[in-house]
Image: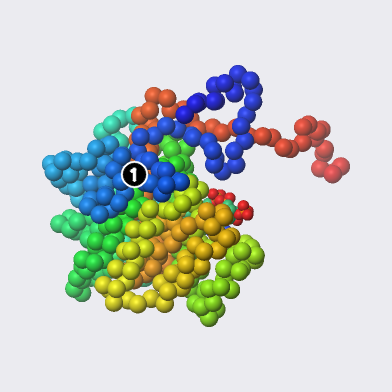
Amino acid sequence: GFDISKLLGQTGLTTLDNGFGNTAACKSAITYIDGDQGILRYRGYPIEQIAERGSFLETAYLLINGELPNAEQLRVFEHDINQHTLLHEDVKRFFQGFPRDAHPMAMLSSVVGALSTFYQDSHNPFDPEQRYVSAVRLLAKLPTIAAYAFKKAQGHPFVYPRNDLGYVENFLRMTFAVPAEDYELNPVVVNALEKLLILHADHEQNCSTSTVRLVGSSHANLFASISAGINALWGPLHGGANQAVLEMLEGIKRDGGDVDAFIRKVKNREDGVRLMGFGHRVYKSFDPRAQIIKAAAHDVLAQLGKADELLDIALKLEQHALTDDYFVSRKLYPNVDFYTGLIYRAMGFPTSMFTVLFALGRLPGWIAHWQEMITDPANKIGRPRQIYTGEVIRDYVPIDAR
Ligand code: ACO
């Protein structure tokens, strides 16, 4: 990590790095990735171990505080989160104002942004107590907001949180339970979702996390910063890829299931078609999350008894791509999103909710990075430079002379 900025500043030179492929914007002690070897670790712990043995809130605590909690620390953290799951009734009214066919990601970012109007005690990012309460409120309320966005689209009444349930159980109940009807939680679904949330919890300086850090670098509050991150996540090249993968698989199925024809289309770059769920800026061998999720997809679909023709298409696509020189030479492997959609679908989520689930998972990472950034004495407002390519100078022309 040689900091070249001071040296360049003295020479008046500027580096141009499209997409920041080779530029570190910060130092960070949260997540380690080795893209060549397919390694991902949260605070030094291998992702495989955390996904196998940890819980989502334990992972959130680890990311935000740097260490795994002991039993008492975890109890307090879970208790604090459980106490904040309700939304203010006026927040609930936001959902009445949205059109029924609004994308849930748009509702999510709007309502999270609006939380800063309700919690004005969150506006000093340098107060550790305010930071903690804001983080707890966000972790507690995002599942409620996400479930309400789902209910809004269904036209169903909202189901209030129940604080005797675990984090994932509570979210599933608020999403799928219908008032006055029994709702039984399926442990297969609970465990799979817990694991998926853990796998999404952080991924260092991806587009949404960098957005959170950039917005936060102006000392904007946590709600404002996270709302911006949710919008960055929405795009199909980032978190929106999980929705795009499912739509791609459905499209291939509609067209008769011809995987070879689709791959040809991708390789010929017809209509800019990409193999969604493939490729990654950092992973150039395999994405360790994708390997865990592929195994989970098989398990969950089998346990839920949901044979899925789309899984067969996905397997064929993967098989084809892994042996095709176009993908091999460009080091394109399945990423975290390639198989998640199939699991979410089997759980009963519509495609429009997939990226919302990603946001629920990524929230602890966003919070951890915002906090790391704001407490770093070396932090400066993020302010990239540019290479100006416009006219050098010209004289103003009055409108009647143009
Ligand atoms: N299908 C077909 N070709 C691809 C794909 C793909 N999915 N991804 C990259 N390529 C090709 C590019 O066309 C390019 O080829 P060229 O050099 O011959 O022009 C080469 O591979 C390098 O691609 P870039 O776009 O330069 O790679 P970059 O690092 O900028 O992009 C990204 C990474 C955005 C993930 C890209 O691979 C992609 O668009 N994938 C599909 C969308 C997706 O799955 N996104 C989720 C990412 S993971 C996440 O956010 C959770």
Left or right, 77 with reference to 392: left
Amino acid beneath label 1: Arg
* Side (left or right) of 131 relative to 15: left
Residue occupying the far bottom of the picture: 256
Residue 254 sits above or below residue 133 on the image: below
Q: Residue furthest left?
A: 72
Disc 1, SS: strand
In terms of depth relative to the viewer, which is nearer, 33 or 276? Answer: 33
Q: Residue 254: x, y in percent?
A: 52, 79
The C terminus appears in which quarter of the rendering? top right
Q: Residues within 10 Å of mark 1 (few under 14, many from 20)?
A: some
Q: How many marks?
A: 1
Q: Which residue is at a point 26% across and 33% down the rendered structure image? A: 129
The quarter of the displayed image where residue 330 is located: bottom right
On the picture, is 307 further left or further right than 255?
A: left
Q: Quadrant of residue 154?
A: bottom left
Q: Residue at x 41, y 49 (%)?
A: 38
Q: Quadrant of residue 75?
A: top left
Q: Which residue is mark 1?
A: 41
Q: Is residue 111 left or right of residue 263?
A: left
Report if residue 86 is visible in the image.
Answer: no
Q: Locate residue 302, reporting x and y percent.
A: 29, 73
The colour style of the image is: rainbow
Residue 18 at what x, y percent from top left? 60, 42
Residue at position x 31%, y 39% in the image: 43
- Does residue 70 appear in this view? yes
> Quarter containing ligand 1?
bottom right
- Residue 281 position, x and y percent, is 50, 48
Task: Specify the farthest residue to the top.
Answer: 10
| Mark 1 C-beta to ligand 1 under 8 Å | no
